[in-house]
Image: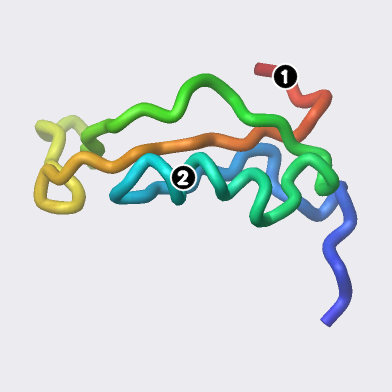
Amino acid sequence: MAEDTKTDLPERITVLAKDFTPAAMEFHRRNMSEKGYRMEGQIVPRKFQMIEGMGAPKELFDGEMFYAVTFVRKGSES
């Protein structure tokens, strides 16, 4: 399999984890800096909802909170 070039990589990647430590370690584990990413914002627990059309939002993951960390390609507009 060919290695991804920086232009093939998505602008943003968000990782969800049930615990803080795995989310915090993901940046280093996957060598995200070498792949051209920086971490955006803080790693905080969040609840996720989905809106389809004009309906009310629906809980994702049965309303369970997950720690979210977003990696942004360096040089991308925020």
Counting from the top left corner in percent of width and height, residue 3 is at 86, 69
Q: Which mark is residue 23?
A: 2
Pointer 1 local density, CA inside 10 Å: few below 14, some 14–19, many at least 20: few
Q: Nearer the viewer, residue 32 or 49?
A: 32
- Locate the N terminus by quadrant: bottom right
Amino acid carrying mark 1 in the image: Glu
| Tag 2: amino acid | Ala
Residue at image point 83% right, 62% down:
4
- Kindly report the distance in space between the C-alpha atoms of the residues bearing marks 1 and 2: 23 Å
Position of the C terminus by quadrant: top right
**Where 29 falls versus 56 (above or below)?**
below
Say if residue 51 shows up in the picture: no
Q: Position of residue 50 (x, y in %)?
A: 24, 40
Q: Is residue 34 left or right of residue 59?
A: right
Question: Residue shown at 13%/41% (left/top)?
Answer: 58
> Residue 39 or 24: which is nearer the viewer?
24
Please provide percent x and percent y for residue 59: 13, 42
- Direction from residue 23 to residue 77 in the image, left or right: right
- Horizontal arrangement in the rendering, residue 55 relative to residue 29 (left or right): left
In the rendered image, which residue does mark 1 sit on?
A: 77
